Image: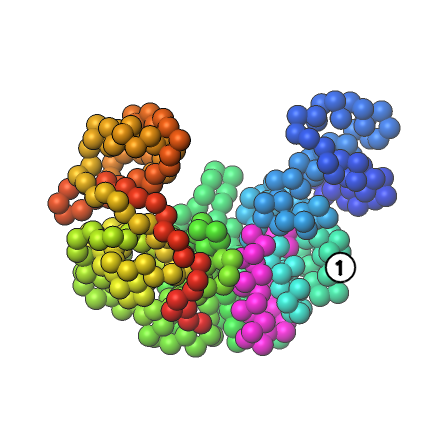
Amino acid sequence: METENFERLLTDQGQLLLAELRDYAPGQELALATRLRRDHPAELVTAALGQAALRQRAAAKFGADAERMYFTPNGVEQSTRRSVAEWRAGRFAALGVRRLADLCAGIGGDAIALARAGISVVAVDRDPLTCAVAAANAAALGLAELIEVRCADVTETDLTGFDAVFTDPARRTSHGRVFDPEAYGPPLSWAIGAGRAARFGALKVAPGIPHEAVPEDAEAEWVSDHGDVKEAVLWFGTDAGADRPHRATLLPGGHTLTGGRLPDPPVLPGGGRWPAAGQVRQYLYEPDGAVIRAHLVAEVAELVDGTLIDPRIAYLTSDRLVPTPYAHAFELTDVLPFHVKRLKALLRERGVGTVVIKKRGVGITPEELRRQLRPSGPNELTVILSRTDHGPLMMLGQPARGRVQPVGACM
């Protein structure tokens, strides 16, 4: 979509079209386009239909705001989820930030959260269409007085006078996802320098960033939302200290676990301290993905009085059921060597038709195993497969109650 066509959506005629398309159902595009083109220019109808479809896709990230916002295809895909943006904005506000430079701002999702937290934002992006969309979003949500949109190269932006800098480098090109941090747009090394340019800085990076790539003066935070790891952020100026530089944050709820960076053997591939391994006991704990990425499994083991079932697999086991937001707990009924025929027979004996399959370190996909099992019956069961030093295990059970109460949370 060209900027000119997008700006037509902001006219009275464009707004009427968008209002008419607010509740349209997918699959009606051809009939709607034919009818609407009788009274409206074809380019405007095409732009309105595309925007209506993008708003429906964006609802999963932006909730009710999506009905009033504007999007580009890349903006929907690459924007920060609202809950995550609000968490980060809250951290900036708690640090006393009042004026922030939002570099590579995209369609303005982060700028909106920051403005709602009371922070004045200068949102910078070099794409004219993206900047037009960001400005329209600020106006549509009543935040234009707090959000200034600048269409410029972020590497040429003067950062003087800002309390904080937030950078979200592009990690995708027309060829797909970029894995080399120096191929980000702008490169990671430049973005790190920008993060150090103000009193506080934050740099959004891929969750899979190697721990050795985290600068010594940065606090690394991994954030998950409803169990899915969404991002990692490198924070500068927070004075986390060398003993507590890593953080796992779980949303909703804002449960935060912190821990040290120095590994003690045995270590996770790439670094990170593991608790000792031992036999499987009554309860199995599956740490949240952000906890695993942050190498804080040992901290969770201390909370639940647990040990690993294998030195390099992030499943913990304990005799105690300890409510914690940092791991899903399962009460086990059977722990057996993994054997498909034996598992199939057990499911048949127990009338199990619904099987939740989890696995780590075992070379079979849940989909493939489910096809082999052909479960049938009224009952449900969770099957957890794991590699161990004594061969692959299958652990059968049910989710334990009492996960949601935070134990040992620390900010």
Asked if 91 appears above or below 111 in the picture, the reply is below
Which residue lies at the image location 44% right of the left edge and 51% below the top edge?
Answer: 227
Residue 45: give x, y in percent of width and height.
77, 32
The color scheme shown is: rainbow
> Where does the C terminus fall, quadrant-wise?
bottom left
Q: Is residue 149 magenta?
A: no
- Residue closest to the eye, 6 or 23: 23
Which residue lies at the image location 50% right of the left edge and 43% below the top edge?
Answer: 173
Residue 52: give x, y in percent of width and height.
70, 38
Task: State which region is magenta.
Answer: 81-108
What element does badge 1 sit on?
A: loop
Q: Is residue 57 visible?
A: yes
Which residue lies at the image location 30% right of the left edge and 32% below the top edge?
Answer: 350
Image position of 201 (left or right of 219):
right
Image position of 317 (left or right of 74):
left
Residue 9: give x, y in percent of width and height.
78, 42
Q: Is residue 100 magenta?
A: yes
Taking the view exactly as shown, the residue that stands out farthest to the left is: 390
Q: Which residue is mark 1?
A: 142
Asked if 120 appears above or below 287 in the picture, the reply is below
Which residue lies at the image location 33% right of the left edge and 30% below the top edge?
Answer: 351
Image position of 408 (left or right of 8):
left
- Residue closest to the eye, 30 or 253: 253
> Where does the N terminus fall, quadrant-wise?
top right
Specify few, some or many for label 1: CA neighbours under 10 Å numbering under 14, 14-19, or 20 or more.
few
- Residue closest to the eye, 301 or 262: 301
Residue 111: give x, y in percent of width and height.
63, 60
Specify the quadrant of the image occupied by residue 245: bottom left
Image position of 251 (left or right of 247):
right
Q: Is residue 215 visible?
A: no
Residue type beneath disc 1: Gly
